[in-house]
Amino acid sequence: MRDFRKYDLTSFREDLEELHIHLTEEQEERFLSFYELLVEWNEVMNLTAITEFDEVIKKHFVDSLSLVKAVPELEEKFLSGKASARKHLTLIDVGTGAGFPGIPLKIAFPHLKVTLLDSLNKRIKFLNEVIDLLELDDIKTIHGRAEDYAKQAEYREQYDICVSRAVANLATLSEYCLPYVKVDGLFVPYKSGEIDEELKSSE
């Protein structure tokens, strides 16, 4: 068993408190295992430029989980005590990279059924390692291009939520991501800063 006592989770817990997210000890340990694996693999392949613990917590983990703040109506579905409300919620993370936001969302909300899509096989191998180490259920990886999988019946219009933190303009992201979303589902791109112009051009 790994010793995680060296990590101070105070600010992580405070940030999650603001999002009304409360993790069990086991979930916290999964986040720490994910962090250690990320740093370990990052030494041999380029997964992230951010490796300092506090930075990863804030800019990757908390940012990923901020989905509940960006879309308040999801909070009830995510955090509802009704198993039926949570059990069937499906999410695809397009261009997941090192697993953001998909893996933090899966750790925090175990009843989500998650698909992680990425075009680089090396990253898929890393993600499979994370899934095995963290013993996550109802989560799978697919290797390929977003525009190709969107044409397949198995994936097209099959998801309640499509998310992406991929670095692309909103018009392009919408083109890639919207085909995955069910009728009445949601596409939530992670964007910050000045995006008015981007929003306008993506309409």
Image (spheres, rainbow, N blue to C red):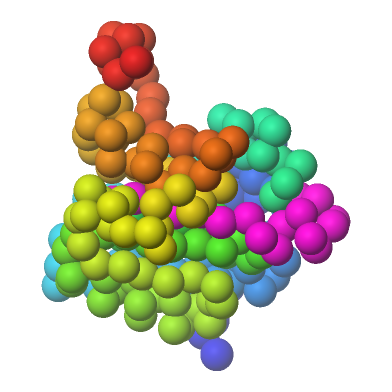
Q: Is 103 placed left or right of 118 in the picture?
A: right
Q: Which residues are magenta?
A: 79-95
- Residue at x 70%, y 63% (from the top left corner): 87
Q: Is residue 79 above or below residue 34?
A: above
Residue 82 among those drawn in magenta: yes
- Residue at x 35%, y 77% (from the top left corner): 128
Q: In this figure, what is the number of numbered marks?
A: 0
Q: Nearer the viewer, residue 192 or 180?
A: 180
Q: Is residue 129 above or below residue 117?
A: below
Q: Nearer the viewer, residue 154 or 112?
A: 154
Outermost residue to the right = 81
- In the picture, residue 16 is in which quadrant? top right
Q: Is 68 placed left or right of 97 in the picture?
A: right
Residue 127 in percent (x, y) is at 34, 71
Residue 22 in percent (x, y) is at 73, 54
Q: Is residue 143 visible?
A: yes
Q: Is 187 placed left or right of 123 in the picture?
A: right
Q: Nearer the viewer, residue 86 or 8?
A: 86
Outermost residue to the bottom = 1
Residue 79 in percent (x, y) is at 75, 50
- Residue at x 67%, y 39% (from the top left corner): 74
Residue 167 in percent (x, y) is at 24, 38
Q: Is 96 placed left or right of 160 in the picture?
A: left
Residue 90 among those drawn in magenta: yes
Quadrant the N terminus occupies: bottom right
Quadrant the C terminus occupies: top left
Q: Is residue 61 visible?
A: no
- Residue at x 38%, y 29% (from the top left corner): 191
Q: Nearer the viewer, residue 148 or 54?
A: 148
